[in-house]
Amino acid sequence: MKKKLFFIHSLFGLACLVGPTPGLAEVYRCDTLNGNIEFRDSPCVSPLEKQALLPYVYPKTSEKVIRQEEREIKALTKRLAADEKKAKQAQNKREKQAEKAELKEKRLALKCERTQEKIRTIETELRRGCKIRRCNRLKDQLIHHQTMAKRNCVMG
């Protein structure tokens, strides 16, 4: 089809270059209803033929190319889904780690409060006075709790 059009265009161009000759008639370009282009000696029959230009129809793509593109799209979709899943899992993991860290801080703060309370209780009892054995045991407990407080509690 393209070769025919090229040949016709070439002949038409050659005829135009040579100039009008008495033996040649005028050439009319007519677009038919089915989208074909025709060159005629006489004008187009109806005005509808000129107006009936159909939009460009792309040539049919081969099945092999279509299947290949479908596979590529499917692979990209799978990859995207996998990446989204990994991102969601990573986000969940970060959230769990943050929750664990927060819970650990709360436990540590509670432990510090208890330790400080025990230290205050022991110091109060030691100030009130007690028997020697009881005082020695309380002093040992006080040293233990103070060591725990230094190790676990942030002093502000």
Image (cartoon, grey):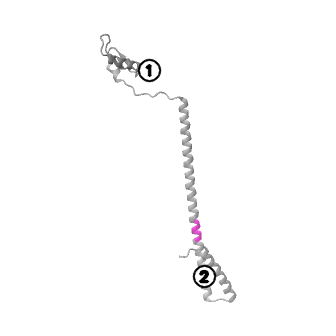
Look at the image and tell me in which quarter the N terminus lies: top left
Indicate the position of residue 21 as horizontal and vertical percent values: 30, 12
Looking at the image, which residue is at 53% across and 35% down? 69
Amino acid carrying mark 2 in the image: Thr
Say which of 31 and 105 sits in front.
31
Say which of 149 and 123 sits in front.
149
Q: Residue 121: which numbered mark, if any? A: 2
Compared with 122, 72 (above or below) is above
Q: In the rendered image, which residue does mark 1 sit on?
A: 3
Looking at the image, which residue is at 59% across and 63% down? 100
Which portion, as a residue range, is magenta? 103-108
Q: Residue 57: which numbered mark, if any? A: none
Residue 140 in sight in this render:
yes
Looking at the image, which residue is at 55% across and 30% down? 64
Q: Residues within 10 Å of mark 2 (few under 14, many from 20)?
A: some
- Looking at the image, the residue that sits furthest to the front is 18
Indicate the position of residue 127 as horizontal and vertical percent values: 60, 88
* Between discs 2 and 1, the one toward the N terminus: 1
Q: Is residue 105 magenta?
A: yes
Q: Main secondary structure of the magenta part?
A: helix
Say which of 155 and 4 sits in front.
4
Q: Secondary structure at mark 2?
A: helix
- Looking at the image, the residue that sits furthest to the right is 133
Question: On the image, which quarter does residue 110 sit in?
Answer: bottom right
**Structural distance between the alpha carbons of marks 2 and 1:** 106 Å
Question: On the image, which quarter does residue 18 sit in?
Answer: top left
Indicate the position of residue 117 as horizontal and vertical percent values: 59, 78
